[in-house]
Structures are given as structure tokens and as C-alpha cells.
Image (tube, coloured by chain):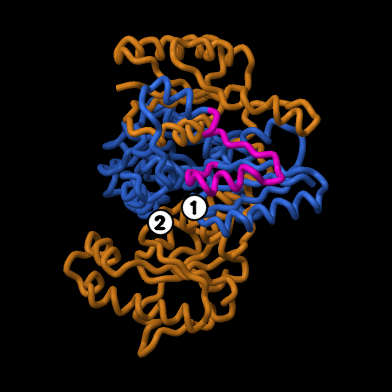
Chain colours: A orange, B blue
Amino acid sequence: MRSAFYISDGTAITAEVFGHALLSLFPIEFNHVTIPFVETEQQAKEVLQQISVSFQDSQERPLVFHTIVNTEIRHIIANSVGINYNFLDQFVAPIEKVLGVPSKPEKHRTHSIHETTYDIRIDAVNYALNNDDGANLKNYHEADIILVGVSRSGKTPTSLYLALQYGIKAANYPFTEEDMGDVLKLNPALRRFKDKLFGLTIQAERLHQIRSERRANSRYASMQQCRMELREVENLYRKEKIPFLNSTKFSIEEISAKILATTGLKRRKY
Amino acid sequence: MRSAFYISDGTAITAEVFGHALLSLFPIEFNHVTIPFVETEQQAKEVLQQISVSFQDSQERPLVFHTIVNTEIRHIIANSVGINYNFLDQFVAPIEKVLGVPSKPEKHRTHSIHETTYDIRIDAVNYALNNDDGANLKNYHEADIILVGVSRSGKTPTSLYLALQYGIKAANYPFTEEDMGDVLKLNPALRRFKDKLFGLTIQAERLHQIRSERRANSRYASMQQCRMELREVENLYRKEKIPFLNSTKFSIEEISAKILATTGLKRRKY
């Protein structure tokens, strides 16, 4: 199998996203190898060696995606026996022309702790954990958004993703039988911050499947219970005009991006 | 201020990473605008309008980074009044030549739920939450890695990031006074899975600062206590040959990338 290398003197996250977006357009499998923090000439030469070995083993030239700020190291990697792609090279010069200023590469600018928003993200992660699963109804004044929905509709992973990626403080609250009574109602804490609510829903079949993996053959996992709970929450969303989306066919990334697009919520990190 | 637009018929995460990596090379501030899920011609035309308004307001042509799979929509956006960059365009043809097969663009290939590793990531997030902060010592046989360290050294956000981004099951365990006694020792649960342990440490000044934000003037936050705990854990790491890193100057992304590089732990998602 042909190898794809992602190489950087930083985390290599940018090289991975760049290469992965390109390779996902091709119906071919690759052996993916990420090598972050290549910071010395010695390390760069070891990487060359690794690329050569991969070439010899597979008899196919590896694709090498790299985003290296350090000039000497970049030159070493750019001369590997692989086929080398550096998207920075191609785009920096035209952007310099447009902006009328030279680029000033600083190592580790992206994905580093030097971003001013770093502490905001950690605070947001702590907030999401402390206000997960209806744990704390007293902190909703601090929330940027409060995700609501039935148990296992995707609230917790989405809250964590919003915190880690965007520095957004997301609480989440699961509607349970207690809230349902005859008909599902918002409790006072949620009603008070109604403008912050965002609802998730999910297909009954998918919910049944997810809950069955946790508690097989329980009332909690039964199709009847799943259908009833989903009918109740969707009625509530419509009645109270709470924006909502069906998470069934979407990844955490897609749900999060849709929430930002729908609500106009501002992220604290780009 | 000049605007930078990130536009896609998917999440726009790739366009953001691509544009952000380039713009971070320039000492200029931008007004960042992300527009995901541009899926109809009508939406694309509204985006053109938004780009025009931004141009009129700032009198500077916006930079438009886009990764759009749908051909019609791509053509509409590529003709905006902004300066348009699509890195796929530049790289797809050369890669087709190397691989000897045509590209087969499918919308939403990256960052979507269609990735086969999706459920693995959700399981890993649940694992991280259920095994956060020493909550559950009985599940360590399932862990891919167990992060250890003193309270507030970065274990929890790192565990969550490893789960969300890479589908890695990371437990974490905080060393507390109970573990310390005369000298810090590994409890039986940790000793049994010693090969999975990875230690975090942090500068005493930074730890003091973080803990003071939580409990000002407490013994917990005092410099003396921070120094003592850090000395104990670092001695333990050395004595037991537990790999470790100092998280002070690193972001969650950097810590996670370094852990993968050091341990050789395989990610379940690329």
C-alpha cells in the first residue's frame, strides 16, 4: 500500500487536514504516517530515511504533505524520494502580493498555546464537564448555549466539541421522565434562559439502537419509549420555538457547524 | 478590517484550517467569517452578496477560501468579488497524475458521519468521561492510555481531545495526597497497567496560578504544595520509567501530538 506522510515542525495537524482533504477525493487506501515536531536536521534526515524505506517496501513513491516553517528543515524534507506537496509554498506569494506585506513565518503559530484564546478553551471544557447532563442548573447564566434533548441524542459530545474547538461554553440538559409528566414542559431554569436553548432530536430507530447497546431489552431502550420521548421533545421545540436539528445523519463536526450557522453564536477561537 | 471568508458545502473545517494556516503567516488582523453548508445556488448567491457587502464596507477585497465539491456552486463562489483560493483545484490534477486514477469527489467525505470510525470516536468520548479524574479504576483494561499527573496539569482536556480527534480511549488519574503518603507510589490498579501510563507535569508557577483561580489562598494552591506534588510525581516518573512531558508551554493539540509521537499509540481516526 502506498504511504501518505504528514510532516511538520509543529503538530502536523494542518498537514493532515490538507492531505486528508485531498486524498479523500480518491478511491484508494493509504498507509497514513504523521510525523510531528521535526525540529532538527538530524530528525529531518531520519524522516528522509523513513520515507525511503516506505518507498522500498511498497515500490510506490510515498506522498509527502508538509508544512514546515524552518527553512533548512523544509529544504531537507522537500528533497525526499517521495512526491512532496507544500501548500504554503503555492499560496504565500500570491497572498503577499494582495496584502502588500511580506509573510512573517513564526513556528507553531497555529494549534499552539500562544494563541490568546487558549485559556478560554480550557475554561469552556471545564464548563462543559461541570454542566454536563443537567448536572448544574445554577450556572446557566454563564452558558453561551444550552443543548437540550432526550438521553443519547448527541448532547455531550457536541458540548465538548464546541468547547474544545471554539471556546464556546455549552451546558447540556437531558429531558427525562420527570420533565415529561403528562406533557413535556420546560423547568424554570430552562425557561429563564430560553433564548440559549438549542434542541437535538434523532431518529427513533437510531436512538433505540444506541440505547440498546447500553441497556439491552430495557424499557429505556424500547422503540415505544424512544418514539414517545422524541414525539414529546419535538412537540416542545415547535411549541416553544426552540431551534433544533436532527442529529441522526450528522457527525459532531457537522452538528456543531450547523448550530453555529443557525444560532449566529460567535466562536471565541478561529 | 479586511474579511476572510471560509466557505464550503460541508462543515468548512478544511477551508478554515487551510486559510487560517496561511493567514497566520501574516502580521495582519482579519474579520473571519465561516459559511458552512452552502448547498443550493440560491444560498451561493446570498454568499456572493455577503462578500460584496464586506468589500463595500471595508474597501478591501475579502480573501475567500473555499473547498466546494459541487461544481455549479463552486463556479458561483469562484466568481465572487473577493480574491478566491481553492487549494483543491491546484493539487488534484497533479495527484491524479501520480496515482493514475481520476478523483471521485463525494460531498462531505471528510468530517462527516460516514467515516467508518465515527462510532469509535463516540465510544472513546464516553470512555474518557466515565474514566475521568480517577472515577473508575476497574476499566483500565479497556484503556489505550492512562494519563497521570497532579490535579490541574492538563489531563482531562487532553483525554477528551484524544477521544474526539483520534478515537483513542484515554482514562486519567490524578495523584492526590492519598497516593503520596511519605513517598508517592502507584496504586495496584495503575501498577497493573503500568505500560499504559503517560505522565504529565507542569511548572510550579503555572500550576500555582491555575489552582489559585479555582481556590485562592488555599493550601491546595500554595506554591509549597505545588512544588512538593510536582517533585513527587517527577520522581515517580523517573523511578518507574513512565514517559512524561511538561505541559506548561504546550496546547492540548501539541500535548496530544507529542503523546502519539512518543508512545507510538495508534489513532483510530485520521
Residue at 79% from the left image edge and 47% from the top image edge: B1
Mark 1 vs mark 2: give the one in front.
2
Q: Is A187 above or below relative to B27?
A: below
Disc 2: CA contacts within 10 A as few (<14), some (14-19) or many (>=20): some
Residue A27 occupies quadrant: top left
Q: Secondary structure at mark 2?
A: loop
The N terminus of chain A appears in which quarter of the rendering?
top left
Looking at this view, name the residue that lies furthest to the right. B59
Whichever of callouts 1 and 2 sits on the residue coming sooner in the sequence is 1
Can you identify the residue that label 2 sits on? A250
Q: Is residue B212 visible?
A: no
Q: Residue furthest left?
A: A217
Real-space Cα separation, disc 1 to disc 2, in angstroms: 14 Å
**Res. B49 in view:** yes
Instruction: Locate residue A183: give its quadrant.
Output: bottom left
Give percent across and percent down for residue A104: 73, 26
- Residue sitting at x 41%, y 20%: B98
Q: Amino acid at mark 1?
A: Tyr
Query: Is the residue B115 above or below the residue A182 in the image?
Result: above
Q: Chain of mark 1?
A: A
- Residue shown at 53% from the left, 45% from the top: B13
At horizontal 45% and vertical 84% (from top left) the residue drawn is A185
Left or right: B107, with A194 as reference point? left
**Image-quadrant location for residue B65:** top right
Residue B84: in magenta span:
yes
Residue A185: image tag: none
Q: Please determine whether, in this image, residue A88 is positioned above or below residue A264.
A: above
State the image coordinates of residue A90 (x, y, percent, origin top left): 62, 24
Q: In x, y percent, where is residue B92?
A: 48, 29
Give the residue number, with chain letter if any, for mark 1.
A161
What kind of element bears circle 1?
A: helix
Question: Mark 2 belongs to which amino acid?
Answer: Phe
